[in-house]
Image (cartoon, rainbow, N blue to C red):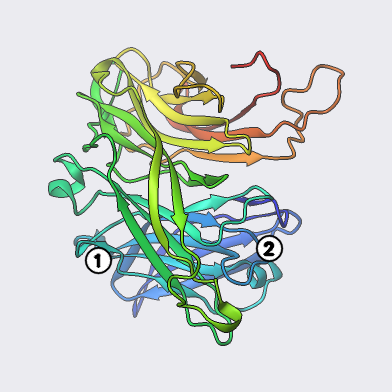
Amino acid sequence: MTSWQTGSWSSLYSRIFQTAGGFWDWLPARPTIRQLHGTSIRSKWVQRCPDYPTLGQNFANDPFVGGIYVGFNIFPCFPGGFSGGLTDDQVFFLPKGPIYAGQGFGFNFGFNFTVGGTRVDTIQPVNVSEWGQKPRAEFAVNSFNINFGGGQCRSPCNGLVVWAFANTLQQVGSPGPKITGVVIPTLSNYVFPAQADQPGADNSIETIDTRISGTVQYMGGFLYPTLASGNGGTSSVLGWQLQPSLDDNDAGTCTGAFTNACPAVTAAKIVREFCYDCGAGHFADAYFGTIQPDPEGNWTMVFNFSNRSISPGTAYTSNRVIWPTPFHDGGFFLCQNNRFYNQFRWGDYTATAIDLLNPAQLGAPAGGTPSRFPAFWFSGMFVKGNGHWSTCIGANTFSLANEL
């Protein structure tokens, strides 16, 4: 995850190891572009293990929400693995300033996120990465998954939850974080996706479940979540463009130096809903989609694709902001080999990033002026020639009027 405001990037990994007192987890490691050293935050849970970390950020140097936001599910565990159901979903609110300076710090966090008394999972904080974007709260989104629809939405689920985390950073005199959320219905239901196909083996590639697997991007007041949903035999990618709304100060929750620092999310509307390969059955399997918008509102979606004739690979499709419907093209493969994949376990997500400087000059004419059109970078998994998985990284951009 890149912060263009500071020229820094953050990485996140989860590593669990046993001690005499229980289990430990390391979160996150944060080097800078200029220095490959940094700080690590270490947290301890006794007989509890974090799983499926999520990552987002808000703009730097803001004393109220300028942070890195790390979410994770928590399960009971023992040395051999997990030993029970979901016990919590937490989000850490980590201050960028002292992390980037390599200094010590304290932090707030949110926990026990529920809807109607039922615990939700896999809350995705949004990634705010463009210089001019300064939302007053850090937004986050989750779908219904583990505890809903009979478990992982094996019966159809409907709706999304949009959260707002305001005044999240520790300061002297602060009244503390303000956490609010709204549930919004979706136009379509979603249901546990069947595993994806490959040549010679139906339903043999993992598609996980109905959680929002990839980072949700924030651009121009809009959020872009996606998830995998059953398509009548395998998996499709269901996605949305959301527009949340905040009030001024949640009826005066914050006063004095913190006046207007505690807005609450009051509503969120679906601007657009779209589905890639819905109803395609075994003809087309799409899974682990992630969308990256640019400041104009154009976007590229990266996803994994396979079917009974095509081995799993990483593909992408793009859309101009003025195009009336999503998915102007059917998509293009970035990396793909016709090889059998026998490990079942797939990568659980794809990833995207906006490149506002575009130093690689994508879209620049040969011998011409270097391009400053934003580039969409993306990555995902594919099957190598030897049948093992590998990572593929690519980029594209819109630079000419005749590019659709």
Determine whether 103 is above or below 378 in the image.
below
Q: Which label belongs to residue 37?
A: 2
| SS at circle 2 | loop
Disc nearer the start of the sequence (2/1): 2
* Image position, residue 48 (x, y; %): 30, 69
Which residue: 22% across, 38% down?
Answer: 192
User: In which quadrant of the rendered view does residue 281 lie?
Assistant: top left
Marks 2/1 in contact by CB < 8 Å: the verdict is no
Q: Position of residue 144 (x, y in %)?
A: 26, 49
Nearer mark to the viewer, of 2 and 1: 1
Please provide percent x and percent y for residue 366. 82, 16
Residue that badge 1 annotates: 87
Which is nearer the eye, 297 or 301? Answer: 297
| Residue drawn 58% across the image and 83% down it | 256
Please provide percent x and percent y for residue 89.
33, 63
Mark 2–mark 1 Cα distance, whole angstroms, equals: 34 Å
Residue 372 appears in view: yes
Residue type at mark 1 is Thr
